[in-house]
């Protein structure tokens, strides 16, 4: 039974990588704005300081670089060397989007199968681990590549306060995934206007009491229409997504020599965790 579950997880992982490859081919263009800004980066830490002042003389790596959006954010801190890991066929889009970044190395490899000689000072993974059915394999490899005392920053979907949203996903996502990408793209655009109306209604009529209003105000509403469409497409398209309970997220990161430093319940709908390699 264990082997069957493992093979099923591998198939889900492969299909999810394929989904994202197709997604980057369609939505891979980076339009600079809030979506790629330092303000957006800092929002993952509830607008507190990131766990570093600058990255001069530091080696920084991102697991699951996608379109290169987070690499653009990290480059603002001037790392001595920046590394992006991406396994999907969207790798060519990633190369195009990051061609102007200095000291950047891109590696086409999955998160559980890369190696950086000499080790890395900081590894980040935003919005990736919750799409991986066997995340412990990736976390182990992340720890392996971190220098002693190195920092790992993880952002994942949260289970808490998302139960209603998860129920809708469970009901409708299997059907929506059957739609051709062109149709799904148009539907995602339509849903951006629905979400805008939902936000305005909650804020003006219900004193911001509806779920996710805080997120919509502080993030979604600041994005361009194209980026809003991408956010919704990104919720529907991937085959596998996991919404982590707080204890699950902590258990995931507190292994393989990683010690939890701090955790943020970002806008009460997701988790940002910071860990340090201690052994």
Image (cartoon, rainbow, N blue to C red):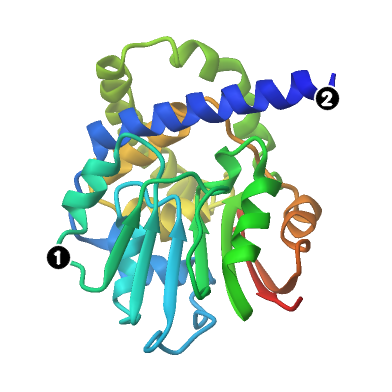
Q: Is residue 236 above or below residue 275?
A: above
Furthest-front residue in this view: 117
Residue 100, numbered circle: 1
Indicate the quadrant where residue 152 lies. bottom right
**In the image, is 144 to the left or to the right of 27?**
right
Measured Cα–Cα span from mark 1 to mark 2? 46 Å
Q: Foreground residue, 19 or 42?
A: 19
- Can the viewer see residue 213 in this picture? yes
Task: Check residue 2 in the rendering and tell me which mark sits there, or answer none.
Answer: 2
Q: Residue at x 45, y 16 (%)?
A: 177
Q: Which mark is residue 53?
A: none
Would residue 4 be found to the left or right of residue 62 on screen?
Answer: right
Dot 2 alpha-carbon crowd within 10 angstroms: few under 14, some 14 to 19, many 20 or more = few
* Quadrant of the drawing holding the N terminus: top right
Residue 113 in picture, x, y percent from top left = 54, 48
Residue located at (41% from left, 41% from top): 87
Instruction: Please give the name of the residue rendered at 31% of the width and 43% of the height, measured from the top-left corner.
Output: 228
């Amino acid at each position: 039974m264990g082997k069957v579950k493992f093979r099923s997880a591998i198939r889900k992982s492969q299909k999810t990588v394929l989904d994202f490859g197709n997604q980057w081919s369609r939505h891979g263009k980076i339009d600079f704005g809030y979506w790629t800004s330092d303000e957006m980066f800092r929002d993952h830490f509830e607008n507190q300081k990131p766990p570093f002042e600058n990255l001069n003389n530091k080696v920084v790596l991102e697991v699951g670089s996608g379109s290169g959006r987070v690499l653009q954010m990290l480059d603002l801190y001037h790392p001595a060397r920046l590394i992006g890991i991406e396994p999907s066929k969207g790798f060519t889009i990633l190369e195009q989007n990051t061609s102007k970044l200095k000291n950047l190395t891109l590696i086409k490899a999955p998160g559980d199968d890369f190696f950086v000689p000499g080790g890395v000072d900081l590894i980040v993974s935003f919005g990736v681990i919750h799409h991986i059915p066997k995340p412990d394999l990736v976390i182990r490899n992340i720890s392996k590549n971190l220098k002693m005392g190195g920092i790992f920053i993880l952002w994942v979907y949260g289970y808490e306060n998302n139960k209603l949203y998860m129920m809708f996903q469970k009901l409708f996502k299997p059907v929506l995934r059957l739609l051709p990408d062109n149709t799904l793209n148009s539907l995602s655009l339509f849903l951006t206007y629905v979400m805008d109306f939902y936000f305005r209604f909650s804020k003006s009529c219900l004193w911001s009491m509806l779920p996710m209003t805080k997120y919509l105000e502080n993030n979604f509403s600041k994005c361009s229409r194209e980026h809003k469409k991408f956010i919704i497409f990104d919720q529907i398209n991937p085959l596998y997504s996991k919404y982590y309970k707080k204890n699950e997220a902590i258990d995931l990161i507190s292994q393989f020599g990683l010690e939890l430093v701090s955790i943020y319940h970002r806008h009460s709908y997701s988790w940002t965790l910071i860990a340090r390699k201690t052994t």
